[in-house]
Amino acid sequence: MATSEEGLIELCHGNGGWLMHELIEDIIRPALANPMLDTQLDAAKLPALEGLPVITTDGFTVQPLEFPGGDIGSLAVHGTINDLAVSGAVPLYLTLNLFIEEGFEISRLARLIKSLGQAADSTGVVVVAGDTKVLPRGQCGGIYLATTGIGTLAPGTNLGMGFVQPGDKVLVSGPIGDHGTAVMLAREQFGLSGTLLSDSASVLPLTLALQGLDGIRFMRDPTRGGLATVAYELCRATGLGINLWQEAIPVSDQVRGVCDLLGYDPYYLACEGRVMAIVSMSDAPSALKRWQALPAGSHAAIVGEIQSNHSRVVLTTDYGGERILEELEDDPLPRIC
Amino acid sequence: MTAEARHWLDLIHGLPLDRTLKIMNVCGGHERSISLAGLRTLLPRKIEIIPGPGCPVCICPEEDLYQAMRLALDEHVLLVAFGDMLRVPVNLPRSQPRSLDAARAAGADIRPIASPMDAVAIARQHPERDVVFFAAGFETTMAPVAALLGQNLPDNLSLLISGRLTWPAVAMLLESEKYAFDALIAPGHVATIMGAEEWQFVTQRHALPAAVAGFTPESLLAAIYSCLRQTLEGRSFLDNCYAEVALPEGNPTAQRLLKNAFDVVDANWRGIGTLQSSGFNLKEVHVSHDARDRFPDHTRASRRRAGEMPPGCACANVVMGQIYPNQCPLYGRGCTPRNPVGPCMVSDEGACRIWWANGVHSQREAPICPE
């Protein structure tokens, strides 16, 4: 009897027996369909890699599990392959760990795995190994995912904070804070709701577009903690300062509205499909042009500059005043008034 | 920058300032707008903008906070509170939970909300639970709370009221004559509810220049200019730079709601002491929704906190605008947002927190530019 999508996950779906076997064969494997995923093997055999291999891993616990513009399945692909992409790598393989709560709807699991499979497929990566665990009711928020990604660096790729120099420009590939705001709205907490879509997406087209440009120093996807946090980490690591220009930083009206209402700062809100890049002064205009030619980069902008005369993140406000962006202290909470 | 902001800045820079002039704002929202726009870095060096008693989180008495925390821990109520109340420290031994956040980590069910309506929604979602809304705030927050009381509240919802009026703190400060500022920016939101005229006493009784401001940098710059010009010309009148929203008589409906819901009583301000006619108390008719009545054990004197400030903490002086945040001996040393000692380092509207978040990390550093 095949596993039906109508049922609920039970503890024995994770015990290694026939129920787990059917769950994997009927629900998970078809959604991740690829010839390299052999569920009979203990370890996946990969072909020899061309280029320097890179590896990264990430865990995913987002609530709600499905939000406008994405879900935990697609996020688990984008989050990990984006870490590879901003390192200058081409992602190739993923492993997938599923931690499912007892009582989780199998139909929902199927939907999330399908979304994960589609996200992987559209980026050209394959899931080659995985594991499934079921936790007793109440022990996790429905489902947690963990993915590990393997990719290879293109020859000559050498990116890092250590290459950043005074005078370099700061670029962002699109409006910031969409993911953080969309998830917040989807929680319908604080009496807010809205139509904003998460920016959750693969950034590979954006990072590939900059390949071959000599002046690329460093790239990062500003996820948790947002643009300000990446900027702050860069200052701490290099001892250099960053000037950011408020009027140049793309922020959507909805994100601005939510921030005004709750007292949040958009510079600290998460993105899941944007890139911040540090590019030499001479190559910054062509980097910008390459990004703007892509659908994902149509709102890309040069938003700041690396400085040697101080070592902080300084935001020049729309009014010409200056404000220092500090390291995030704690999760933002709505203000009293 | 907008043309209007440029206009006000040009006028301000054109004023013949021969000494340092200090202007106090009494609204956390004003302080936040000033800091977010970096206005201090745009004003002439001779103008100082100092934050005053404008943060409801900072002056919420410790005993109220302690009561809320113990209700959540001991009575297992579902406590809802405005987000920035969650991290305010209570002066307790480190072995005990010292904030609502810490109580939550210890197992209490405490949920942050952004609007009083959320409290009702949560109570309706959990009819089997006792839900307590810890309602701290100024007139701007208490008016919507009063509106709730005018509706049919769910039986399982009670209110732990810790509301305050803004003007008595300013009146006390001016009457003490221990103030060191030349003019006052009056709070726009409070004036919208209670009427701009409520602030006439500043100019009429104390001959101090004053202007009501809104929350855009343009409106704040206009109010700053008005305050400066009045000071230079030796005049004092209440200018309204938020006239499109804050009417002279305020919002009569909101005032009526407040009057129907609350008695105005003497009330304690954290670190400052009791101020006459400065607090809101639930009227007798709403006693069935009064958390203090529902859980009387928690109002017994033996279970109250003394409400003293932690040793060395100068939040009270910061709140009253007597010192700058970074003139407190603990600022940046024992007291940081990661490890707050006093309430001003907690709320996003607390002067210490705002200054810290904007990069002032050492004592008596000029609050304007990076090194």
Image (cartoon, coloured by chain):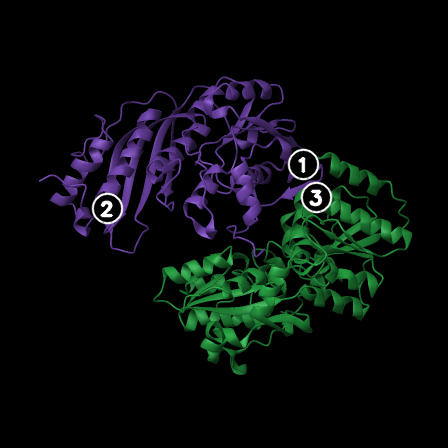
Chain colours: A purple, B green
Chain letter of the residue beneath label 3 in the structure image? B
Which mark is in front, 2 or 3?
Answer: 3
Chain letter of the residue beneath label 2 in the structure image? A
Circle 3 is placed at which residue position? B217
Residue A81 appears at what percent x and percent y? Answer: 38, 31
Chain letter of the residue beneath label 1 in the structure image? A
Q: Is residue A123 left or right of residue A137?
A: right
Kindly identify which numbered label has been placed on residue A139.
Answer: none
Q: Could you give the CA–CA distance between mark 2 and mark 3, rounded to whole angstroms? A: 51 Å
Amino acid type for the residue under numbered disc 2: Glu
Question: Tag 2: Cα neighbours inside 10 Å, few (<14), some, or many (≥20)?
Answer: some
Q: Could you give the CA–CA distance between mark 2 and mark 1, rounded to whole angstroms? A: 49 Å
Residue A214 in sight from this viewpoint: no
Quadrant in which the C terminus of chain A appears: bottom right
Residue B319 appears at what percent x and percent y? Answer: 69, 62
Q: Residue shown at 74%/64% (left/top)?
A: B170
Amino acid type for the residue under numbered disc 1: Asp
Q: Residue shown at 49%/64% (left/top)?
A: B100
Q: Is residue A94 left or right of residue B81?
A: left
Residue A96 in sight from this viewpoint: yes
Residue B51 appears at what percent x and percent y? Answer: 71, 56
Q: Residue shown at 73%/62% (left/top)?
A: B198
Circle 1 is placed at which residue position? A318
Quadrant in which the N terminus of chain A appears: top left
Q: Are marks 2 and 1 in contact (CB under 8 Å)?
A: no
Q: Earlier in the sequence, mark 2 or mark 1?
A: 2
